[in-house]
Image (tube, rainbow, N blue to C red):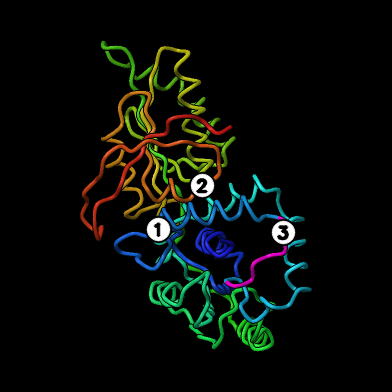
Amino acid sequence: EGGPMCMLFAATYPERTAALVLNGTYARGRWSKDYPWARTSEQVEEDLAAVERQWGEPADMSNAAPSLMNDSFEREWFAAYLRNSASPADAIALWRWATEIDVRALLPAIHVPTLIVQTAGDRWAKLEEGRYLATHIEGARYIELAGRDHVIWGENSDRLVDEIQTFVTGALPAAPGEGVLVSVLSLEIAGPPSGVGADLIERYAEEIRGELLAAEGRQIRRSASGFFAVFQRPTRSIQCAIAIRHRLRHSGLDVRSAVHTGECQVRGDDFTGVAIELSSRLLDHARPGEIIASRTVRDLVVGSGLAFEEHGELEASGLPGSLQLFSVSKPAA
């Protein structure tokens, strides 16, 4: 589950990423028709029940490291490692969140030197997981190691370290590009049936810009009653939409908002790309006071405290299929 976080960082901050190394990781945590090697919801529930029963006991290494499963010292050490990492309740929450992650939509936005290492017999991250990443991250180098252990200190650990060291020391700095991964917030002010005057909108425009600034957002466009802004963190974009909605509601104004995360092209202060267009399209599905988010955004904010409800689908040109939509049902805790 550390892999998706690193992929998100590399796509969002390419100027701060010299290289990306992914070992035994995945792009999506649960089974779907187009990702059939991940665990099903039923299997996930079985895993969670096992975690609840066994957390803190000598660890079952049959999946993590089959080569070490008969070593009592390793089993006791791994159990202590797990106990010191999380309580049983935290372990279950983290495990569930990890299965809800889906970063497939972000893979084309990764433009840094990338090494993908996959152990052929890994029972936690299957062979197809690494091959999928290698296929969808442009220019990635893919290495397949023999063996069955998932943990990095198991069999072939020396070979794994050698491959990583060779790659990192030989990786060239990422060339600065114009593509950047951002979360795009589009919003529109709506008021009483009589409409919202330009003077009233302008009066609150400064307050909206203040909320954008506080949430580390950047306004990129402006229309008569609408705003477009970009954020480097998807959670901040939703929190900002919630704050703006709360602030303007006290003045009798409603705001409808939409958020989508994707790659944009940057030229000076100008942002263009499908992500902005999709955010605008999503806004058409939002009612006054409602915040609509794409499936991509929902999958990236797992564990943030935000809750979502299904809100239909969007068919758009340039997408391989439909884009699932969600409405934000409550703010972050």
Compared with 222, 53 (above or below) is below
Where does residue 208 sit, x and y in percent of width and height? 49, 28
Camera-side residue: 291 or 79?
Answer: 79
Quarter of the picture holding the C terminus: top right
Identify the secondary structure beneath mark 2: loop
Do the residues bearing badges 3 and 1 touch, measured as CB atoms within 8 Å?
no
Compared with 229, 14 (above or below) is below
Q: Residue at x 25, y 60 (%)?
A: 320
Where does residue 25 sit, x and y in percent of width and height? 52, 69
Q: Which residues are magenta?
A: 56-62
Q: Main secondary structure of the magenta part?
A: loop
Q: Which mark identifies residue 53? A: none
Check disc 1 and report the residue beneath it: 40
Q: Earlier in the sequence, mark 3 or mark 1?
A: 1
Camera-side residue: 293 or 11?
Answer: 293
Q: Residue at x 57, y 55 (%)?
A: 50
Check disc 2 and report the residue beneath it: 302
Q: Earlier in the sequence, mark 3 or mark 2?
A: 3
Q: Residue at x 21, y 49 (%)?
A: 315
In this rendering, the label closer to the viewer, 3 or 1:
3
Q: Amino acid at mark 1?
A: Thr
Q: CA distance from mark 3 to mark 2?
A: 28 Å
Q: Amino acid at mark 2?
A: Val
Please state if 80 lies on the left or on the right of 234 as rendered: right
Do the residues bearing badges 3 and 2 touch, measured as CB atoms within 8 Å?
no
Identify the secondary structure beneath mark 3: loop
Check disc 3 and report the residue beneath it: 57
Q: Residues within 10 Å of mark 2 (few under 14, many from 20)?
A: some
In this rendering, the label closer to the viewer, 3 or 2:
3
